[in-house]
Amino acid sequence: SRNVFLENTRIINIQSTANGGGVYFSFGSGTIRNSEISGNDATLKAGGLGITGSFGSDVTIDNVTISGNTSDDEGAGFYVDAGNGQNVTFRYITSAFNSTGDQQVASNKVESGGNINIESSIIVSNGFDLLFDATNNIINNTIVGNYSGVAIIGGNNLTETGVALSPLAALNDTGLKVHEIEPNGLAHNYVNDTFGKVGCGTLIPTDQIGTQRPVDTTCDAGAYEYIFIDLIFNDGFE
């Protein structure tokens, strides 16, 4: 298909003997929003998500958890090879616990002549977290663990930094699984809307599972917006 729209979708446990275990955009445009890509596998590249294309085949990924995917080659989590003039945008994604099985091969990789924009995201706990070779890049409000590649253009980014994440779990009746962040952790209230086009509470009004953004003064990085739930009170006790 030339134009794909997926929302509130679980893309899970798919196996491919080629590139692209979960979703692979090959010269097609589309959007994935408020969704989960987990447990997929590719024999070659892009275990969870693959994107390749050219001018006019733009792809946007908003509020998506990419977790527990595997590949034998690069990009167990996501792999992007965008062509000249192609726009690829990631906003509020969490890419974690993806594995190539080789610590020398990047679990998330961007090599591109296109225009790559990453906003308000978490890319950690993948071993070699991100290899970024796209010179036309803008990255803002993003936390990356092990990073290698070109100089990052943008603000309020951290590299070589970890984020504590809970195991993948469904936290409400959407059935979509996310990694919960710590209430006092680095990703909580991390987004600074003076950098980039973060869309906190406007362009991106909720998190992946429907929680209003922001819960506090500003948005959390990644696909999940932390909200305190008083389980004792909800059971009818004070």
Image (spheres, grey):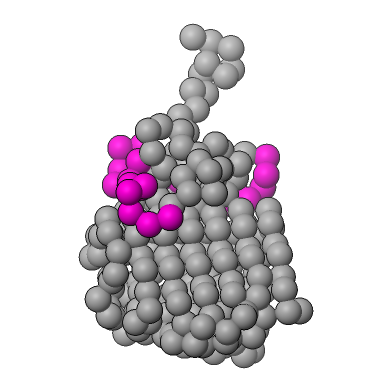
State the count of labels: 0
Is residue 21 among the parts visible in the rendering?
no
Is residue 213 among the parts visible in the rendering?
yes
Q: Closest to the observer: 50 or 115? A: 115
Q: Position of residue 222 (x, y in %)?
A: 44, 53
13 left or right, relative to 157:
right
Magenta-colored stretch includes residue 183: yes
Q: Position of residue 93 (x, y in %)?
A: 48, 59
Q: Position of residue 166 (x, y in %)?
A: 43, 48
User: Image point 35% across, 41% down: which residue?
Assistant: 189
User: Image point 28% across, 71% down: which residue?
Assistant: 152
Please provide the residue range marked out in magenta.
173-197
Q: Position of residue 156 (x, y in %)?
A: 27, 55
Q: Closest to the observer: 29 or 190? A: 29
Magenta-colored stretch includes residue 16: no
In this rendering, the answer to whether 74 lies above or below 181 is below
User: Image point 40% across, 32% down: which residue?
Assistant: 216
Q: Quadrant of the N terminus?
A: bottom right
User: Image point 55% across, 58% down: which residue?
Assistant: 62
205 left or right, relative to 190:
right
41 left or right, relative to 10:
left
In this rendering, the answer to whether 200 lies above or below 47 is above
